[in-house]
């Protein structure tokens, strides 16, 4: 499913009306009907609803909700944040007429008592509907709308947001001063960026996308795509009946240090469960010993060390193994001391195989080490990407879509920005937004598990962009299996890794 920005949404609306002859009021009716259906899920038989409407077409959608509730015998009160109907948009005025004909008696914000009346109405309601501002809203929320938002949040009732929670920027998910905290958001036509980043991710609650009658060929392509299993399924390597370990991908893992030995174990274990045919861990001797105790399936390449990290002279040992591998993972647990930086700089000058650059290897890049000229995939978290882009983590998180796109362009390699709704970015391609995964994955080792999956897919000849998108979906789905079977808090990266084969089967159907 494609994801539409505010500008793209306006263009879809315009073309539907101007080029395809879809009446604007018909779109508004369908939008209001979708929100009405969502509202009913939160109502008991006698429960009352407060619908709060703005002046524009979002308010018109809310008036449709109020009318439909009334027509279905549901108790409803309606407030409009305008002094009179002359302040409403043309289509909202038309919906006001239909609502009043049906028996809805809206309260306008033209009297001093409206705020106390709204507070009292919320207190006696079961549900509130937010139809104050739509996806085109920009700038700080002020005046009566700000008061209404504060009152709706303080009321403690479930809120259904129409298209977008008021006070959230559509494209960045940033909060415009104050914002509605919705239990449910019903957006229209296509999902919007605010659902996947910033404060919007938290404030939207459970969200859904309603079909309101836009012609199908208007619904994409756009600049971002929400991944589904059927979209990544064709990328999965299929293992022939007569396959052998040499044809299933040989992965070299350059990871770990005396202080962080577990990273190498986690990457190797994930690669095994992701289907790598041969796994070689290249690290300092103490790490190799630990890997041997946990992963008898792994081959070991002990490297010269300096103060517990790989030494600069380890470069030649790694390069000598290059021809025996199909791809490599560089970074987890390495540290970014001078000896490590010197080693990676020398290795990458001569590296000719696909490589995943992660964790400390990314930190080395931010400190001046040049990436390999050959194809790479990068998997930074926001802090690592901030260092690579000479920004703060807050700036990265302020607009993750923009940050991922800029990173791929600057770094000239496909880049995956980790976090809720992980984003994969490649030059000349739309952003791929991953919907799988959950907050239980916010524990140590999860990034190492992802590295093992990406590395395996690179070793099995997937292009870096495909490997990143596929691995993100697969990794998140394994996390979702953990949440279902164990609970949303308390499962480990090891638990996730053990579920990778089952998640793969689920994707492949």
Image (cartoon, grey):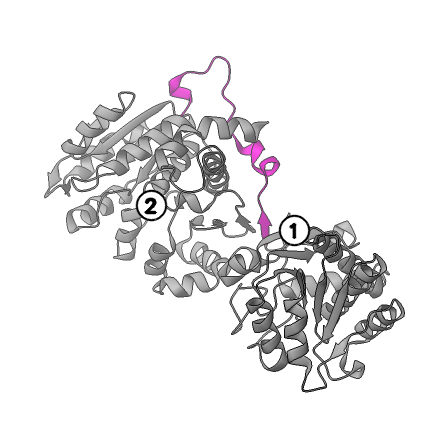
Q: Which residue is mark 2?
A: 358
Which sits earlier in the primary sequence, circle 2 or circle 1? 1
Mark number, residue 64: none
Residue at the left extreme of this rendering:
307
- The picture places residue 222, in percent across and down from the top left corner, at 63, 55
Where residue 350 appears, as percent x and y from the top left, is: 28, 41
Q: Residue at x 76, y 50 (%)?
A: 216
Was residue 227 drawn as part of the magenta stretch in this picture? Answer: yes
In the image, which residues are magenta?
224-249
Location of residue 61 in the rendering, given as x and y in whole percent from the top left corner: 76, 65
Q: How many marks?
A: 2
Whether residue 334 appears in this view of the structure is yes
Horizontally, is 285 left or right of 264 in the view?
Answer: left
The answer to which image quadrant residue 357 occupies is top left
Foreground mark, 2 or 1, reads 1
Residue 278 forms part of the magenta stretch: no
* Residue at figure coordinates x 76%, y 82% from the top left: 87
Q: Count neighbours of disc 2 (C-alpha within 10 A) and say few if under 14, some if 14 to 19, many if 20 or more.
A: many
């Amino acid at each position: 499913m494609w994801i539409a920005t505010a500008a793209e949404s306006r263009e879809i609306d315009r073309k539907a009306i101007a080029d395809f002859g879809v009446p604007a009021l018909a779109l508004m009716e369908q939008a209001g009907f979708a929100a009405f259906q969502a509202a009913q899920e939160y109502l008991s038989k006698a429960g009352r609803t407060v619908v709060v409407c703005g002046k524009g077409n979002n308010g018109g959608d809310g008036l449709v909700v109020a009318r439909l509730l009334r027509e279905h015998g549901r108790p409803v009160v309606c407030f409009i944040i305008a002094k009179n109907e002359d302040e409403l948009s043309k289509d909202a005025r038309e919906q006001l007429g239909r609502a009043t004909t049906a028996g809805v008696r809206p309260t306008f914000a033209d009297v001093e008592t409206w705020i106390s009346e709204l507070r009292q109405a919320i207190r006696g309601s079961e549900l509130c509907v937010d139809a104050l501002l739509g996806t085109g809203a920009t700038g700080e929320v002020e005046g009566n709308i700000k008061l209404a938002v504060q009152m709706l949040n303080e009321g403690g009732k479930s809120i259904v947001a129409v298209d977008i929670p008021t006070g959230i920027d559509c494209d960045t998910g940033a909060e415009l001063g104050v914002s509605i905290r919705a239990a449910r958001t019903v957006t229209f036509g296509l999902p919007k960026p605010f659902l996947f980043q910033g404060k919007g991710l938290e404030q939207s609650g459970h969200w859904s996308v309603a079909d309101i009658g836009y012609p199908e060929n208007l619904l994409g392509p756009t600049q971002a795509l929400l991944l589904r299993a059927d979209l990544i399924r064709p990328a999965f390597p299929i293992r022939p009946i007569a396959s052998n370990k040499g044809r299933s991908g040989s992965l070299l893992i350059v990871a770990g240090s005396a202080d962080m030995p577990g990273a190498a174990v986690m990457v190797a274990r994930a690669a095994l469960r992701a289907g790598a045919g041969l796994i070689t861990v290249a690290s300092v001797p103490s790490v190799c010993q630990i890997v041997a105790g946990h992963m008898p399936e792994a081959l070991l390449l002990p490297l010269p060390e300096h103060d517990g990290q790989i030494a600069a002279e380890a470069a030649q040992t790694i390069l000598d193994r290059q021809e025996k591998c199909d791809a490599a993972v560089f970074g987890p647990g390495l540290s970014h001391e001078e000896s490590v930086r010197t080693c990676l700089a020398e290795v990458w000058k001569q590296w000719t195989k696909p490589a995943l650059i992660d964790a400390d290897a990314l930190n080395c890049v931010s400190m001046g080490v040049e990436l390999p000229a050959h194809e790479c995939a990068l998997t930074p978290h926001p802090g690592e990407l901030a260092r690579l882009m000479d920004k703060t983590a807050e700036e990265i998180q302020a607009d993750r879509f923009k940050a991922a796109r800029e990173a791929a362009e600057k770094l000239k390699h496909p880049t995956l920005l980790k976090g809720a709704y992980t984003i994969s970015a490649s030059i000349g391609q739309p952003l791929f937004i991953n919907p799988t995964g959950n907050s239980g994955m916010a524990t140590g080792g999860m990034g190492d598990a992802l590295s093992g999956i990406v590395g395996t897919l690179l070793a099995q000849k997937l292009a870096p962009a495909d490997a990143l998108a596929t691995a993100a979906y697969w990794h998140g789905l394994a996390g979702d299996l953990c949440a279902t079977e164990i609970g949303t808090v308390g499962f480990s990266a090891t638990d996730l890794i053990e579920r990778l084969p089952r998640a793969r089967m689920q994707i492949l159907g």
